[in-house]
Image: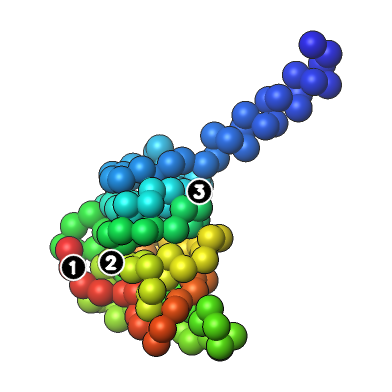
Amino acid sequence: MSKTENTRLEILEGIKSNYIAAGATLVMTAVGHAGKTIRLDTAAGSTCTLPAATGSGRKYNFLVTTLATSNDHIIKVANVTDTMTGIIVSMDDTAAAAVAFAAVDGTSDTITLNRTTTGSVTLGENIQIEDVAITSTTNRYLVKGVISNSGTPATPFSATV
């Protein structure tokens, strides 16, 4: 193999290693998952638990690569003190209308894509989550995302942890 071919293979392998399959359940770590794209890749739904928030600035990206056909795709915090703040925009799959949902700061701790009103309707939906320190509080995740819905859109945020 030529040097150019080896370099191309190394680049492709590096790209592949940036994607991590969530499977049915993924308990995430800062070292193993920060800066990576987590593929929500299970038709029976993927549940991902974030590491404890520390204000580190680490970023996690989630990408719907398989539409859930039973259960839900879920992203949640690790403990009762961590919460989410931020916005997810949802695009209606038929009306071409969009609506934004804000997390309830200090309360929201879970994102659920339920296959209809709160997401997992279109491949490529994505959510970015950053471990941030807001107002000197280190137990917050900043959420930005774009999803799609069918039926009447509803907030994907809830408090379940």
User: Which residue type carries mark 2?
Assistant: Thr
Rate crowding at label 2 as few (under 14), some (14 to 19) or many (20 or more) other CA atoms within 10 Å. Answer: many
Report whether residue 147 is seen: yes
Q: Are marks 2 and 3 in contact (CB under 8 Å)?
A: no
Cα distance in 3D space between marks 2 and 3: 18 Å
In the image, residue 79 sits, relative to residue 42, either above or below, namely: below
91 horizontally vs 54: left or right: right
Residue 28 image-quadrant placement: top left
Cα distance in 3D space between marks 1 and 3: 24 Å
Residue 8, x across and y down, in percent: 76, 27
Which scheme is used to colour this image of the protein? rainbow
Q: Which residue is the site of mark 3?
A: 37
Q: Are marks 2 and 1 in contact (CB under 8 Å)?
A: yes
Residue depicted at 28% across the width and 59% down the height = 71
Q: Earlier in the sequence, mark 2 or mark 1?
A: 2
Residue depicted at 31% across the width and 74% down the height = 157
Q: Earlier in the sequence, mark 2 or mark 3?
A: 3
77 horizontally vs 145: left or right: left
User: Which residue type carries mark 1?
Assistant: Thr
User: Which residue type carries mark 3?
Assistant: Thr
Q: Are marks 1 and 3 in contact (CB under 8 Å)?
A: no
- Quadrant containing the N terminus is top right
4 horizontally vs 128: left or right: right
Give the residue at the far top of this rendering.
Answer: 1
Q: Which residue is the site of mark 1?
A: 160
Cα distance in 3D space between marks 2 and 1: 6 Å
In the image, residue 12 sits, relative to residue 135, either above or below, namely: above
Q: Which residue is the site of mark 2?
A: 110
Residue 152, x across and y down, in percent: 39, 87
The foreground one among 19 and 67 is 67
